[in-house]
Amino acid sequence: MKYMLPLLLILLAVSSCKKDEEKQAEKDETIITQYISDNGLNATATGSGLYYIIDSQGGGASCNSNSTVVVAYSGYFTNGDVFDESLISGIEFNLQGVISGWTEGIPYFKEGGVGRLLIPSALAYGESGSGSVPGNSVLIFDVTLIDVL
């Protein structure tokens, strides 16, 4: 009996967190679909909340969620403010060491591919944010998959 109250409090906290996550996912979905509509984009939804646009598929090697790749990118908010970008030569990283939206999204491109990832906050930096990215931010990335290593 003495364990019932702590267990109940834990269940309530978990339930509340799930509801907050669901509300944020709905907000992010609205923001992304409005951005797509406002900009006349033709984006594909993956089911996780991520949307992607392939401008050029690329003709080189494919990658997967465990690949090491070189990507040139520009990251910005839906208002167009840039928060990060690479050099044209790109940056090398393993897809297991980046935000989930990249781990999921970059494999849609082949080497030489160009496009855009529209990433909900849960697949980016979540409610805590990171550096100049506030919590619960939808992020847009223009990407070029330069190389699959």
Image: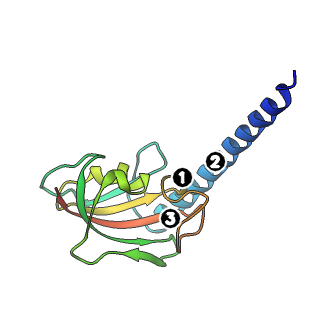
**Residue occupying image coordinates x 48% and y 64%:** 139
Residue located beneath label 2 in the image: 21
> How far is disc 1 from disc 3 in space, using C-alphas?
17 Å
Answer above or below: position of 84 versus 101.
Answer: below
Q: Residue furthest left?
A: 60
Say which residue label 3 marks. Answer: 35
Image x and y of residue 85, in percent: 36, 75
Q: What element carries label 2?
A: helix
Q: Do the residues labelled 1 and 2 touch (CB within 8 Å)?
A: yes
* Mark 1 residue element: helix
Residue 47 to residue 99: above or below: above
Q: Name the residue under label 1.
A: 122
- Look at 31% across and 75% down and name the residue there: 86
Could you classify mark 2 by the number of other residues whose Cα lies within 10 Å: few (under 14), some (14-19), or many (20 or more)?
A: some
Mark 1 and mark 3 lie on one chain; the one further toward the N terminus is: 3
Residue type (three-letter) at the residue carrying disc 2:
Glu
Label 3 sits on what residue type?
Answer: Tyr
Split into 4 quadrants, where in the image is the N terminus?
top right
Q: To which quarter of the image does residue 30 belong?
A: bottom right
Disc tally is: 3
Q: What's the residue at 35%, 62% (across, down)?
A: 116
Q: Tag 3's secondary structure?
A: helix
> Which residue reaches farthest top?
1
Residue type indicated by callout 1: Ala
Question: Is residue 18 toward the left or the right of residue 45 in the image?
Answer: right
